[in-house]
Image (cartoon, coloured by chain):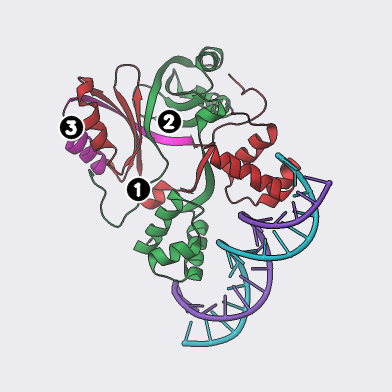
Chain colours: A green, B red, C purple, D cyan
Amino acid sequence: MYLDEQDLRIIDLLQRDARATQLEMARAVKLSQPAVAERIRKLEERGVISGYSARVDAAKLGKDITAFIGVSIEHPKYFDEFLKKVLSLPDVLECHRVAGQDSYLLKVKTANTRSLDSLLVGTLRTIAGVTRTQTTIVLTSMKEDTHVHVSPEPPKGA
Amino acid sequence: MYLDEQDLRIIDLLQRDARATQLEMARAVKLSQPAVAERIRKLEERGVISGYSARVDAAKLGKDITAFIGVSIEHPKYFDEFLKKVLSLPDVLECHRVAGQDSYLLKVKTANTRSLDSLLVGTLRTIAGVTRTQTTIVLTSMKEDTHVHVSPEPPKGA
DNA sequence: AGTGAAATGATTTGGCC
DNA sequence: GGCCAAATCATTTCACT
């Protein structure tokens, strides 16, 4: 998976603004506009770029609470059933299997404390094998990106 | 902030695929293409849609580790300095102030265990006021979206 | 791979209901 | 607010290096 500096720059620009025109990007990386189009096509083909999405303000859509929920499951035999149920819940934005005390870590955005309560007690705790949930409520998000850092230089602090 | 069913549908379509054409969306919501364009313009103006980004595959960009890091800070007087430093670290994708034992919860994507070690010990633990970090390593991500659920019906499990 | 120029396709604008 | 039709702008394709 070789990516040169111009590919990285294009990826960075598209993460910031997927509406940037190929002509603008072409100027930024000093290539012609069709060359940029061709590079983007290949990045999509190779799966480096997997799609494009609108960023939305969750609060303006009535999701006022963000929380992280650690879920302990007593035995791996329950994992499949747990995943099947959890992945169908619309307020669950992320579901990671993790190392450590908990089996899974979820990120949820939900309307309010009532809907969070319902998700925790009414839904998660009723799934077979779930022995414990540990919820961390977000007070303020200083940064909440998906923007993966790409740069020819090694990342700062790493 | 009133959003009708057609607005919600457009938001959903744009979260899935920001490249969907206005004509396609117009068919889906049974409006004309300029009507869709006008609704999108207003959603952007109101900040419901805050931008558009490319989704990228972090692993293909050499970020093989995802981790969540809880950071305890001994006194709020250290918060500003902590934020200033942490928000400048490119591998930190999210930084949330949270309720509970820890003061902050970070989500990071970093190259490997070495770069994670360097971030934890070389960077975070040297920031004034940081008394503890608690790292949860992600083994597999079953879902990792930003796609906020929008629908006229109440969310399932909430 | 890259380029410039032409063709195609999408969005924006204007006039009207 | 929404619609249709025209104009503008972006992307895709083509012939060539």
Identify the residue position indicated by label 1 in the image. Answer: A149
Which quadrant is home to the N terminus of chain B? top right
Using the rendered view, name the quadrant where residue B2 is placed.
Answer: top right
Magenta-drawn stretch contains B100: no
Using the rendered view, name the quadrant where residue B81 is placed.
Answer: top left
Q: Earlier in the sequence, mark 1 or mark 2?
A: 2
Q: CA distance from mark 3 to mark 2?
A: 29 Å
Q: Is residue A141 above or below residue B52?
A: above
Chain bearing tag 1 is: A
Horizontal relation, residue B47 to residue B116: left or right: right
Magenta-drawn stretch contains B120: yes
Q: Amino acid at mark 3?
A: Ile
Residue at 45% over, 27% down: A106
Give the camera-side residue of B88 and B80. Answer: B80
x and y percentages locating residue A151 in the rendered image: 32, 54
Bounds of the magenta segment: B114-143
Residue at 66% over, 50% down: B22
Q: CA distance from mark 3 to mark 1?
A: 22 Å
x and y percentages locating residue B69 in the rendered image: 30, 30
Task: Return the mark for residue B127.
Answer: 3
Identify the residue position indicated by label 2 in the image. Answer: A97
Horizontal relation, residue B115 to residue D5: left or right: left
Q: Amino acid at mark 2?
A: Arg
Give the camera-side residue of B18 and A44. Answer: B18
Q: Secondary structure at mark 3?
A: loop
Residue at 68% over, 45% down: B36
x and y percentages locating residue A5 in the rendered image: 34, 62
Give the camera-side residue of C16 and B81. Answer: C16
Chain bearing tag 3 is: B
Q: How many marks on residues?
A: 3
